[in-house]
Amino acid sequence: EVQLVQSGAEVRKPGATVKISCKVSGHTFIDYYVHWVQQAPGKGLEWMGLVDPEDGKTIYAQKFQGRVTITADTSTDTAYMEVSSLRSEDTAVYYCGTKLESWGQGTLVTVSS
Amino acid sequence: DFVMTQTPLSLSVTPGQPASISCKSSQSLLHSDGKTYLHWYLQKPGQSPQLLIYEVSKRFSGVPDRFSGSGSGTDFTLKLSRVEAEDVGIYYCMQSIQLRTFGQGTKVEIK
C-alpha cells in the first residue's frame, strides 16, 4: 500500500520560510513524480508543481514560480516543498501526491504576525 | 494553460436521487496514446481528495458502481445514480494530459 506521510502543522510570520516534508513508502520512490497542491481556506485545489525524484527535475505552475522550491531526497524517499517570503495569502493546507490516487494527509501552514 | 470549468458549483440532492456534474476543458484531453486524461475526485470534509474515476470512465478500486463517468474530448460528466449521505463533499475534475489542472469544485450536500 502506498503511503505519503507529511510533516505537521506550521505557523510562520510574514516574510519567513517554511519547508514541508512528504515521506513516501509502498512503491519505488524514483518511479513516480511527486506533486504538490495548495488548498487555501474554503477554496479549491490548486496544482503547484512537481518533482521527478529520479533526476530532481522540477516543473512549477506559473503562479508559484520563484517563491516555491520542490526537492526530493532519494536517500530517505522524502519530497520537500519550501515556500519563502511568506505572506498571509500562503495560509493553506498543502498536499503532496503521487500517481493519481495517493495523497498525503495535508499540512496546514498558517502565516500570521 | 488548461482551464477546467465545472457546473454546477453546488448541488443539493435528496437521498436516493441521481446527480450529475459537468466538467469542460479548454483543450482536448485526448492524448496521442489513445487515452483521455480526465479524472474525478471527491474531497470529503476534513480529508484529502480521493480518486473516484480515472481516464473518464474507469472506476478506481473500491468505488461504488453508483458512480460513473462519461465524455470525450473536452466535455465530461460524473453521474451518481443514487446519492447517499456518505457522498457529501466537494467533487473535482482534474486533467493530467499536461501537468495537472483542477476544476473549481462542485459542493454536494444532502437535502
Image (spheres, rainbow, N blue to C red):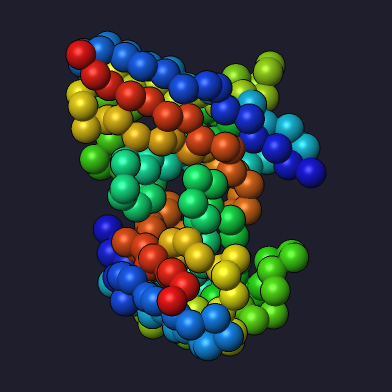
Question: Which residue is at the front of the view, A55 or A80?
Answer: A80
Task: Please give the count of numbered marks on the rendered protein.
Answer: 0
Q: Quadrant of residue A103?
A: top right
Spot the residue most to the front.
B111
Q: Quadrant of residue A110?
A: top left
Question: Which residue is at the front of the view, B98 or B43?
Answer: B43
Can you say whether B16 is above or below A77 in the image?
Answer: below
Q: Quadrant of residue B50?
A: bottom right
Q: Is residue A91 left or right of residue A2?
A: left
Residue B68 in view, yes or no: no
Can you say whether B55 is above or below A88 in the image?
Answer: below
Q: Position of residue B71 (x, y in %)?
A: 48, 85
Q: Which quadrant, please, contains the N terminus of chain B?
A: bottom left
Q: Is residue A68 left or right of residue B34?
A: left
Residue A75 in view, yes or no: yes
Tell me the residue at 42%/18% (across/down): A10
Tell me the residue at 64%/35% (across/down): A4
Can you say whether A54 is above or below A15 in the image?
Answer: below
Q: Is residue B65 left or right of residue B28?
A: right
Tell me the residue at 38%/40% (across/down): A38
Q: Position of residue A45 (x, y in %)?
A: 38, 50
Q: Which quadrant, please, contains the C terminus of chain B?
A: bottom left
Tell me the residue at 63%/30% (across/down): A5
Q: Position of residue B94 (x, y in %)?
A: 44, 62
Q: Position of residue B99 (x, y in %)?
A: 42, 52
